[in-house]
Image (spheres, helix red, strand yellow):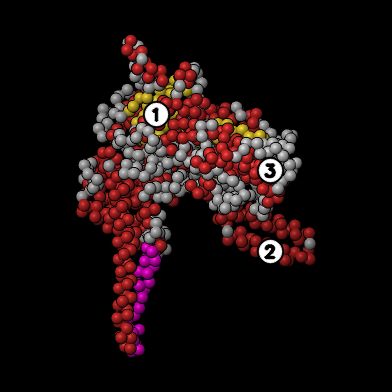
Amino acid sequence: MALVDVIISCTDSLKQISEHVEDAIVYLDAGSTESFQFIGAYPILLDLGAQAICSLESMSVLDAVADWNSHSNPAGKFVVITSRLLSDAHRYILRCLSAHQVVRHCVIFTSISEAAHSVFPDSPLGPDAYREYESLLVQDYDELNKKSGAKPRQFGSKVQAKIKFEDGGRSKLSPSGEDVPHLEASSSGRDFLEQTPLDSTEDAVFKLDVSVHHFPMILCPLSPRVFVLPSEGLVAEAHLSSEHEDSVGPGFPPLSTGMLSDTDDVPPGATLTAHFLYHLAAKMDLKMEIFSLGDMSKTVGKILTDMSSLYDVGRRKRSAGLLLIDRTLDLLTPCCHGDSLFDRMFSSLPRRNRISNTQGKGSGLQLKLGSSYLQRAPLDAQIPLTKILNDEDWQINNFRLLESVEAFLCGWNSGDSDSQVTGLINLGQKIHEKESHSSAEILIGSFVSSETFRGTPFLEAILDRRTKDGGLLVKKWLQETLRRENITVNVKSRAGFVTKPELQAMIKALTGSQSSLLKNKAIIQIASATLFALGETNCTKWDAFSSAEKILSVSSGETSQSLAAQIGDLINKSALLGSQVNKGKSEMSKGLLSLQDAILLMIVGYILAGENFPSSSSEGPFSWQEERLLKDAVVDALLENPSVANLKFLDGIREELEKNVCKSKSEKDTEKLDIDDFDDEQWGEWGDEDVEDDSKNEQAYGDVQLKLELRDRVDNLFKFLHKLSNLKRKNIPLRDGSLTMEGNFSEDSYMGKGLLYKLLTRVLGKYDVPGLEYHSSTVGRLFKSGFGRFGLGQAKPSLADENVILVFVIGGINGVEVREAQEALAESGRPDIELLVGGTTLLTPENMLDLLLGDSSFF
């Protein structure tokens, strides 16, 4: 029997739409672009006959010129693949139709099913969403051409003339939205569909043919068995909870208190997640036995069960177990800096900018972002290869190019050579001044090498390794590649150790020729990402975090006073860092943590305190004296360094805090004036004492008001920390301690492990897990309700009995959890089980801070 492979399932789905892709221009939105990069879909689409692959949001009229299949006819159709609602993509699709003159067929693939469109609150489309949208798009396109005055045989010609070419042919959306109709997210969209006649293209020679289809396989596989959802896709961006007392943020499920409503108040993210998993299982020919842990997972499991039918159950599919887990059952693991090379690489590498953030302000999506949707960090991590390679080589090559051009100009026109050479010298100076900026744009690698992903699954092996083991594995790959290419590198090497000069020398040797660079791009990029993550700056900060978290963990096993003292010490050290940065002493602050880092560690400390010092009230795990000291430390640190912490609870007063810091500095400078400068002329100013006192009183009153406002906001911060400290008490599955303490297992196996490891260990060992619910299939319910009275009842299945297990964490996963899940499977002694791990998004500690206290939070 074939192994379950997410990447193969995605590529097979692409091949199934080959008849639509052939001879078409393919437009991908931001979420599809991110997904297809991880899948390695671009070569597949070109092999299927696509004439060009372009960005939907950055559409250009020149897209039709980029014809990769020159033997084909001019494109008479284009294909749009989107990971959003049809109403959200409507403006972009209509703009593409208007920009291209000869388009007779438009095929649209969306990852959001018709059923999801009908139940999603922001969608104006009904149960027959696809057919409704086909009619709407034809109407809007015809109306747009009538407004522009296009002739029947020159369909779209005047619309084409409207497009400006100053930006390379890129058409921007107008903020007013007058030129392009938009399907608003309200009931008016449905009314518009019903009131407008369908046949509005009678005077056109070529009637536009539009078809909409469902394409669910838009996901980002990190390996054949690990995947997350694209960051700019609707499923990942939709809220998982609304703002209430049991919610910790829109990007996480609410706390599992057992009080979640089963009916109307289901967050849109839960509905979309259920529909995605249902169609994923169908595409992979899996019949799911559903288990859930947590209130949100229970809701998603019920939606999945209701979507199943007798036809689906009766088909010949491979049986698999689906384990749904709420992220709020374990917020500690993704907040910590664990021992994972993958997490180090992904956290340290810069990300590309969000595509949706760079578009026109008039888009309907932009109007909704920030209130209805989350803005998650892109998964596309960029590797600055020129920083890893020797920058001097790039400088030398730049100036060699300048010398060559200079020689050419001297030979071309000797009388004018002096002025040309002067221009070249000025150009050389500009290149030297902007060296770092230009070199970063010359050569940038991607975290995933899509072209050779299937042949060299390096990332899959890295996911299962700790930092040291992963570094040694990358070193081994480099050595094997150099041996295969017959390249010799003279560098000192120590067995069992990985050094930066060693990796850098081997990478530089492999990039010596263009053929070697292209052939070995995958290993070069993974090795460069490893080198960047293990660099001094990134490695020092990660190790400082890890050490602080270990100290907090040890202190949490002692007394609350010890833990509170450690948290206060971290805050005070961060204040010291801020003062050093303000004084320009960057070298002295190396290796220290900022105030924002200290607040992240304070979150870790409060979660640990809640697990070890449970409180029966909402007042927090520490005494009021200990917490008062912590509040005073945070307030003082923010007063001294307000710009260090870029957190949402400071919005509105950050500028005032910064002005207050500048004012206090200027006052200190004036106090340093020598008292001997006091002259006799100032005796005449003694009569103005009352005026000066009034101004000082006003200033003091303003400072007091600012401090009181800051203290109120810090109080709200600590109320939120109290909620995090109550995770164990409020989450029903965690109350008995079986998933947080060693239980029936040795302390060594549970020490420092996350919830996913503990849960899989118990499940695969066939131990009872409190709160784990099984969702009966349609046939199972039938046996239970009908045939069960005749003794034909069905025994409750066990997740450990399945040969395929898909674990999906609603809210996101990180690299440490993927590694620990594989460790739990290996320790169970069940090599026959195929384990797949998925999540809403890929989490880093910085993402967690943003989701809890940053721009993507309720705070």
Relative to 572, is 217 on the left or the right? right
Relative to 677, is 59 on the left or the right? right
Q: Which residues are magenta?
A: 656-682
Question: Residue placed at 41% from the left, 25% from the top?
Answer: 305
Q: Is residue 661 magenta?
A: yes
Label 3 vs label 1: CA separation? Answer: 44 Å
Label the magenta part by its dominant secondary structure. Answer: helix
Q: Name the mark on residue 301.
A: 1
Q: Name the mark on residue 570.
A: none
Label 1 vs label 2: CA separation? Answer: 68 Å
Q: Quick check: can you spot residue 811?
A: no
354 vs 202, nearest the viewer: 202
Q: What amino acid type should be assigned to the residue bearing mark 3?
A: His
498 vs 542, nearest the viewer: 542
Residue 112 higher or lower than 381, as above or below: above
Q: Quadrant of residue 410?
A: bottom right
Q: Position of residue 768 (x, y in %)?
A: 29, 25
Label 2 vs label 3: CA separation? Answer: 42 Å
Question: Residue placed at 26% from the left, 30% from the top?
Answer: 743
Residue with the mark numbered 2: 423
Q: What amino acid type should be assigned to the residue bearing mark 2?
A: Gly
Q: Is residue 297 magenta?
A: no
Q: What amino acid type should be assigned to the residue bearing mark 1?
A: Gly
Q: Secondary structure at mark 3?
A: loop
Residue with the mark numbered 3: 100
Q: Badge 2 local density, few (<14 within 10 Å), some, or many (20+)?
A: few
Q: Position of residue 682 (x, y in %)?
A: 34, 86
